[in-house]
Image (tube, rainbow, N blue to C red):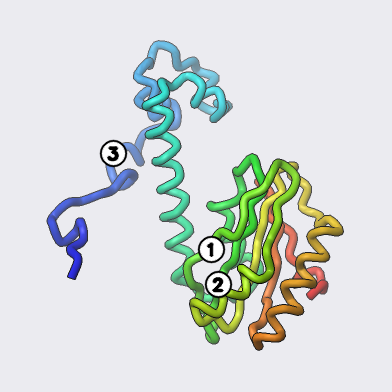
Amino acid sequence: MKRTYRDKGIQLSLFDNDYRERTDRELIAELTNKPDQVAEEWEYSYSMERLYNRLTPQRRRIAIAAVELYKRREAGRSRSQRIRSSKDIDRIMRPLLADLEIEEFWLLPLTQCSGTMKPIRISTGAIDQTSADVRVIMRKLVEVGATQFAVAHNHPSGSRMPSRDDDRITDKIKNAAELFNIRLLDHLIITWDTFYSYNDEGKL
């Protein structure tokens, strides 16, 4: 049996430490290693892009990796819950999609009791579009033994409203899933501050 880091007595925790108690300004000063350059304005109105641009290439890689790990951990915590509404799906998928600058399409397989499985990224696209291969989605659902599922993608533009292409791919996915007796519960379009639910809008 493969030993885990915990088995070896190694504690890996990026955020369960004294950094959690520090202010945003203190964290920025720590990350940039240049506290004298952290102006008062950063404490409440800092720009993440501006912050990243001030980092050295090595520190930028570390920062991006840390943020990505944090988002995955937050999504993992939500996966222990059952899906009862579109808000539950949003809670799981938002850390993975909300702040991206390009569109991505994700699959969230579910058990018969609406328990969640690990989200699966289906495709990565451009600023205003992404593709979703229905065959890949069906194959993934069969592989993990899902009986229900939801799909989600983001709109970096900030618009929550679906496009005609969004409507078409939703219909294709729903119709294909019915052939496998797998139910599509919802399709969410996620923006940085809100989301659109096909189920809530009566379009499924």
Q: In the rendered image, which residue does mark 2 sit on?
A: 140
Foreground disc of the pair 2, 1: 2
Foreground: disc 3 or disc 1: 1
Q: Nearer the viewer, residue 186 or 131?
A: 131
The residue under the point 64% across, 72% down is: 85
Q: Which mark is residue 18?
A: 3
Q: Reading the chain from its start, which is encountered first: label 3 or label 1?
A: 3
Q: At label 3, which amino acid type do we have?
A: Asp
Mark 2: secondary structure = helix
Query: Is 134 positioned to the left or the right of 143 in the image?
Result: right
- Mark 1 element type: strand
Q: Residues within 10 Å of mark 1 (few under 14, many from 20)?
A: some
| Mark number displayed over residue 170 | none
Amino acid type, residue under disc 2 in the picture: Lys
Disc number placed over residue 120 in the picture, else none: 1
Q: CA distance from mark 3 to mark 2?
A: 41 Å
Give, as a three-letter code, the residue at label 1.
Ile
The quadrant the N terminus occupies is bottom left
